[in-house]
Amino acid sequence: MTEARRSTVLGATIALFLGVLFLCPLLGPTQLSFDRVFFPTEGGGSDQDARIFFSVRLPRHLLAGLAGSAMACAGMVFQAVLRNPLACPFTLGVAGGSSFGAVVAILLGLSSATWGFSWLTFFSFLGALLSLLMVYSLSLAFRSFSAITLLLGGIAISYFFNALVLLAYYLADFTQAYSMIHWMIGSLDVVEMGSVRALGLGSFVGFLLLWVQARDLNVLCAGEELAKTKGVATGRVATLCIGTASLMTSAVVALTGPIAFVGLIVPHIFRLLMGNDHRFLIPAGALGGGAFLMACDTVARTCFGPSELPVGVLTALLGVPTLLWLLLRPQVRPA
Amino acid sequence: MGIFQLQHLHAVYPGAAGFSLSGIDLEIGEGESVGLLGPNGAGKSTLLRALAGFLPPAQGSLRFEGKDLALLSARARARKIAFLPQSVQFAFPLRVWDIVEMGRHPHQDRFRPLSQQDHKVCERSLELCDALPLRDRPFQELSGGEQQRVLLASALAQTPRVLLLDEPTQALDLAHQGSLLILLRRLQRSEKLTLVCATHDLNLAGVLLDRVVLLKGGKVLAQGTPTKVLTPGRVRSLYGATVEGVRGRAGRRIFFLRSVREGARP
């Protein structure tokens, strides 16, 4: 992949991200005007537009952006460290664990927030950590952090938690069951700015930690043994990257539910567009993943009015054809 | 003084029962080419990985340039010791140039792009391996011989003092084996490289190497120049195969397989 091509894709992604970030929240049941939101005239009754923009639409929009960014980065890192193109942020069982935490909270009747503290978020974060802890101790038990141990451990733990989720679903009454399904599809509604800020800070730190490892990740794609001969402290890099990416995923999933496919498809779209150098891939993926989820959310909340489509459904419906189109386009050879 | 000094080296693969190397005493001189030979399971690959610093000694000592190898960081090690693996599986498609660039990894910091000098080193490494025309090709589309040359160029881009080779000729046809051997000999002289090569190829050992070390059961059975050490009798006791040695140029022996002893180790 030529350097020029890489710069073009990176530039286009930045433009797309900024466009989606500022323009999409203007769309919705109430059409907002760009001028009245960003340049409110003094006096006059026009600052209603600004209020809807900043206190209703922006938190949700920012959550979508952050969630998309974090998932795309985490997905790229998992694919590189596990050297498996099918890896995604949920490969280590985070989705199963956090779903389990969430359904437990719903079953205990803790699904509503008390004084702005969401037990649902708290429990699903704990669930995600529990699943990570289990995969980690499995690897310790086998005394190996090889990709295959982590992959198999993650899959086993996922199935285990999915079974527990089904059990909880079976035990739940009708309303609880509905909340469970609603949570597991993944959605971006009902957030306050506080948790968005916390997620923003957390994922920015995570992003930096991962980006700093980019060159090591490039070499790690060539296999653990070759990476060692090129001077990569493979154990340390893998642990740091997987730990960071897992925590980012857990935090996102706790707020939004397991939104499908962003963490798998966005990395591949960018791998096909700009090659496999993670120094450029990670920032591009962060911006692209954010833009993708923000755009999906905008479509989900505007195009099917008066009701909303769950965004998790839309990411898969839009993402899969995009990926297939890129894969099957004959003139672009992955290189 | 040798570049590698091994004293009573024992090594274990993690999770394996028993020593894979038990009591190796060996010294490898600077600029020397040494072959590790022996039947499957004799400890050739293990010894090579110990020299690469992947396997810390369980007992005994392994010194590199007079210092304990296990104390060097992965980066410091990679600046001095390069390793040519048997084969590589890349998880994602890469260009030849990306792979050669990886050779500069231990010399670079995290973000700065390749310096002028890094560029020169990479280009020179490709040129030494006759692979410069391949630089923009996707690695996956190359033939086995071309891939080998690219991996070798990537190893040379580390500007190492030692090159460790794991069965370098295994996947190559006869002509490519020959050109690889010539290339390695040339590099040994021009780059003052120390070569350590694990191989099953007795004829390669005879042509390329200054010294061979015969391993069996994790121990050194014999060592010396190929002409002295590689005799039909010793090959029979080592592999359980009857061979015929024909004298080639410069007194080197070339071996032909005649028969395999019944019940020889698989």
Image: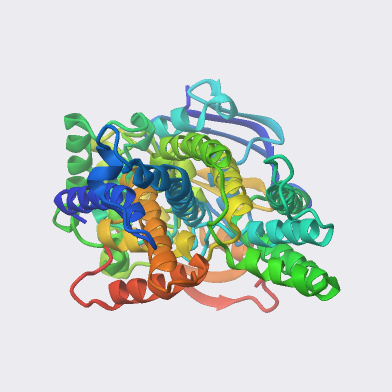
Q: Residue B245's quadrant in the figure?
A: bottom left
- The answer to whether residue A87 is left or right of residue B255 is right
- Number of numbered discs visible in the structure rendering: 0
Asked whether B254 or B28 is in front, the reply is B28
Which residue is at 82% across, 76% downward? A170
In percent of width and height, residue B141 lies at 27, 69
In percent of width and height, residue B39 lies at 60, 61
Instruction: From this view, report whether residue B210 is shown above or below residue B264.
Output: above
Asked whether A64 or B182 is in front, the reply is A64
Q: Is residue B226 visible?
A: no
Give the position of the C terminus of chain B as an image quadrant.
Answer: bottom right
Q: Residue furthest front?
A: A44
Q: Residue A329's quadrant in the figure?
A: bottom left
Q: Is residue A193 visible?
A: yes
In percent of width and height, residue B117 lies at 19, 30
In percent of width and height, residue A56 lies at 47, 48
Asked whether B262 or A71 is in front, the reply is A71
Asked whether A136 or A67 is in front, the reply is A67
Instruction: From this view, report whether residue A143 is shown above or below residue A187.
Output: above
Which residue is at 75% across, 54% downward? A138
Q: How is the image coloured?
A: rainbow
Which residue is at 28% across, 55% downward? B149
- The answer to whether residue B134 is left or right of residue A334 is left
Instruction: From this view, report whether residue B111 is shown above or below residue B132.
Output: above
Instruction: From this view, report whether residue A172 is shown above or below residue A275.
Output: below
Which residue is at 32% across, 53% downward? A26
